[in-house]
Image (spheres, rainbow, N blue to C red):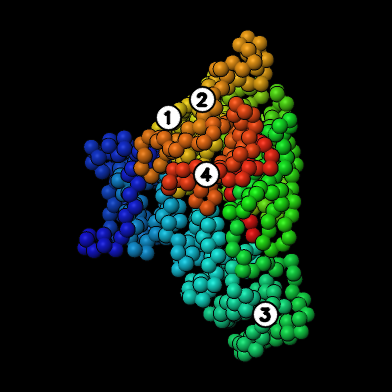
Amino acid sequence: MESEEREESEEFDFSERIFFSYLSETVGNCIQTPYDLRLNVGDNVIPCHKVLLCQESEFFQLMFNTDMMEKKQDTITLKDVSYKAAKSVINFLYLRSLVVPENEMCEIVKVVDMFQIHILRPVCAEILLNSCSVSNLISIHCLASQYRYHDVADEAFELILQNFSELARTEHDFLEASFELILKIFRAECLCCANENECIRAILSWIQFDVSARHAHLVDLLETIISAEISCWNELEARSYMFANHSDALDFYINWIARGKKQANDIRRSNVRIRGKQLLKVCVAAGGTGVDRSLKHVEVKVPLGADWSQMLPYQHAAAAPAAAMIHTHGWPAYAARNRLLYVLGGEITLDVKSRVVEVFDVMKNAWREMPQLPIGLTCAAATCVDHRLYVSGGYEDFHVVTNKVYYLETDGQGNAVGEWKNGPQMQFRRASHALVNINGVLIAIGGVDSNLMPTNHVEYLLPGKSRWLKMPALIDARSHFACAVFQKKIFVMGGENRPHIPEWQRSRVVSTFGSQPEFIRKHLFTVEMFDTESDVCWEERGNMRRSRTKCAATVLNNRVYLAGGFNETGLMDLATIYNPETDLWHPITSMKFRRANFGLAALNLY
């Protein structure tokens, strides 16, 4: 029986992942003692240890650490739970390996949510993302949306739009999708299909699948159709029979066809979206420090395109000049997600830090302000996890390096949901560092410490945890470096590895040691990489062609783009790309403006 189960299951081994290594100590202590808890699931029993469950599950922590009646029991009965899923989740805590029985991934996600074992969310997110195919995109999107795996849901929805023709033609999931999802698909900004005939046929097929319940949605769905571009009117007239028992829908449908045939489209154009365009990802550079001032303008590079430009190359409309920032930001933090670029904090004067946060929506070509940070910060680091925006570290007023972490809930469209909240503080104070997200795990890397010395410390925070844990340290202590994540590998590039001298101290240092004291900074051209799937230490990779600090990096089309920065020759406009497979760097066209301390992001443009 067990061998049959193994044949029908798929195992995902996370035992080599550094993120879960902390479990070893607790598990080692547990296996030396008898099981003290049994979970009854149907006719089956799962033996386990209370201490391990209380450590990792908020559900069991509440059960056994409060005055609930189960507190003194050694047997707990669980209802409405899949035994196979519950067993897989509990076994992960012991083995750091998740066995997914056939057709049980949905139940595993449900159990993880019920037990509130947050460390399994990155595991579930990775498995869901890796399992995406045309045949399951809708089910993965719905599952991820229901349990708040927003990054997974957004990725699946993007793939739904890009593969719409095949999905609507061949997949039963499309016919069973909810009205809300179908409407979202046809209102989307980039729905890839052959023509408008394909859209109206898909809508009618979806309605016909359950016409008695769905005919009421006909009006809303037809409002998304560009009727002037339809040519299959005879076919549409022939399909009017499907509304024979629903006179209100039939009348609307016949009138809609009549208007369309006369090319008098009275459908609300505000809901019409462009069809047939593939998603375009562009490299966007924003803000930073220029030759003699802080910059507010934006420039864009299209992959395989010739030059950087201040024009946004829209596919559905004429190119437009990219909007400039609302405020100038000296030394801010940057974070990007899908079509959005966030700019957080910065320096107003040497002694005053900014609390301002603004976001750029590349599709709307507009900047807008968001709730301000709780305190002014400069040289902080930021990233996005699902719909949550995080900022960590940096300098507070009076040049104090902090270890504070704040986060802001958003709706995923650049709109705040509530105000900034306090997150778990980092173990180390740090500024001019990097903060990255790998499937929901936050990782803080390098920077300068409270003594303004470059550090090689790295730490990470798992979802639901209140304490940051140490990771293997960088080979070289460094600050003001560029950082990018590609296929769960972290790359750090360039930076400085000498003490950072703040602006307010430089005149005294220069008067003592001369105009260019050697110890003030050393610009690096070295590159390090950490593979979060297997490595126990950082590895050296191919060096950049030039040393640089205060540069920026992003990942686009399986390449790392690196641009701008500063070295002994001054501000730089040079840009280059790195191929992780060949470990080689190649120059590309330079930016239009020399800039450092700026944001560089790969954004979705339609």
Disc 4: CA contacts within 10 A as few (<14), some (14-19) or many (>=20): few
Q: Are the two marked residues, 2 and 3, in contact with CB atoms closer than 8 angstroms? A: no
User: Residue 286, how many percent across, how many down?
Assistant: 67, 42
- Separation of marks 3 and 1 at Cα, in angstroms: 61 Å
User: Residue 126, how many percent across, how many down?
Assistant: 43, 52
Q: Are the two marked residues, 3 and 1, in contact with CB atoms closer than 8 angstroms? A: no
Quadrant in the picture for the C terminus: bottom right
Of tags 4 and 3, the one toward the viewer is: 4
The residue that disc 3 covers is 230
Q: Tag 3 or tag 2, which sits nearer the N-term? A: 3
Image point (70%, 34%), residue name:
290
The residue that disc 2 covers is 497
Q: Is residue 38 visible?
A: no
As rendered, which of 114 and 388 lies closer to the eye? 388
Image point (74%, 32%), residue name:
293
The residue that disc 1 covers is 475
Image point (29%, 52%), residue name:
46
Secondary structure of the residue carrying numbered label 1? loop
Q: Is residue 407 left or right of residue 76?
A: right
Q: Are the two marked residues, 2 and 4, in contact with CB atoms closer than 8 angstroms? A: no
